[in-house]
Amino acid sequence: MPTSLLLEPIKIGEMHLKNRIVMAPLTRMRANENNVALPIMAAHFAARADAGLLITDATQVAPEGRGYSNTPGIKRGEQLMGWKRVTHEVHRKGGRIFLQLWHVGRYSHPFFQPERKLPLAPSAIAPEREILTPDGYQKVPVPKEMDDTDIRRTIEQFRQAAVNAMVAGFDGIEIHGANGYLIDQFLQDGSNQRTDAYGGSIEKRARFLFELLDALVKVWGENKVGLRLSPSGRTISMSDSNPQKHFSWLIGKLNAYPLAYLHLIEPFEAVDHLPGYASNVAAFYRPFYDGLLIANNGFDPFSAAKAIADNETDMVAFGRYFISNPDLVERIKNNQGLRAWDDRYFYSGGTKGYLD
């Protein structure tokens, strides 16, 4: 399959993208201790501005949404200035960039929380995981079940973060609804066992996401808000009783929203032996969604081009290949080999494995 398919232009609404190659959101832990995007992040993204679309590191919408050290925020003035450096450099190189909005929910620790409080979650169910803090790995505590006030405040935090992203010069935003974080915790019944209007049926479990979409589309307008989901994801102790049925319904309902795109993650582990889990996520869920689709995880340029040719997706997001090949687009264009990544420097901080 010719990889030239990846180089064809495409539009998101009225936004022209020069190719179908997306830089996936990557949590590289290169912000400072105040969660400010550093100048090296501007250089990092600018070096990859030949991609059709760049998606930033997951960016916490509020202090309560933090679960990792040295991850960026979009709340305070200095955080906005850090991101303004990034968008300026990307736009100077002719690129397009979306900010990914993030809240980790239960996958956090009092160390990261304001006033050392418990993390927030749909239900008081802890993931069976440890979490890395500056004091080493710690057991994730049982979170506080969110009440109506918590839910309203969190939606407002997302809304304000969306406003701040606009001020910082982004071309759009992506909602992180995947990989076992807060929105995913509401969607999957293994982590959401509420009995109120936000729990029980998939219609009720999806209410939090739909209220977020209503708020953020109102801020940004049509074709400027993307959504990332992991329908077959089981990271951070996630589970669902019937993911194919539940996510098919959810993705069908997304057609009512003027989204920029739907970004689907292929499973990180084999799920063929698990009833109800799709092993080829993009292919399975494509018939339920009418809009632009981005597929992610496990693709090389050849399998990505084939997925586009087979109409399983419209664009493909690359993560690890973009880490080791800032010139990925040029290498695909010239049929050059790709450098292997070195995972020792994924989360190490500094410029090694980031700018070199």
Image (cartoon, helix red, strand yellow):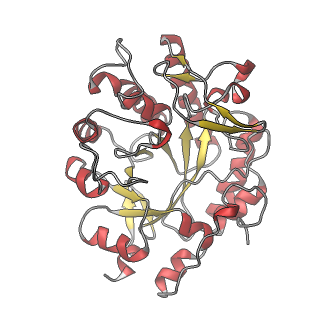
Quadrant containing the C terminus in the rendered view: bottom right
Give the residue drawn at x 61%, y 31%.
Answer: 65
Is residue 272 depicted above or below 132 in this figure? below
| Image spot of residue 44 (x, y percent) | 68, 63
Give the image quarter of residue 107: top right
Q: In this view, does 91 lie to the left or right of 348?
A: left
Looking at the image, which is closer to me, 188 or 96?
Answer: 188
Residue 309 visible in the displayed image: yes
Is residue 142 depicted above or below 274 in this figure? above
Give the image quarter of residue 186: top left
Residue 218 visible in the displayed image: no
Looking at the image, which is closer to me, 202 or 172?
Answer: 202
Quadrant containing the N terminus in the rendered view: bottom left
Give the residue drawn at x 59%, y 76%.
Answer: 327
| Image spot of residue 169 (x, y percent) | 62, 49
- Report the number of numbered marks: 0
Q: Is residue 353 left or right of residue 58?
A: right
Q: In this view, does 299 lie to the left or right of 78?
A: left
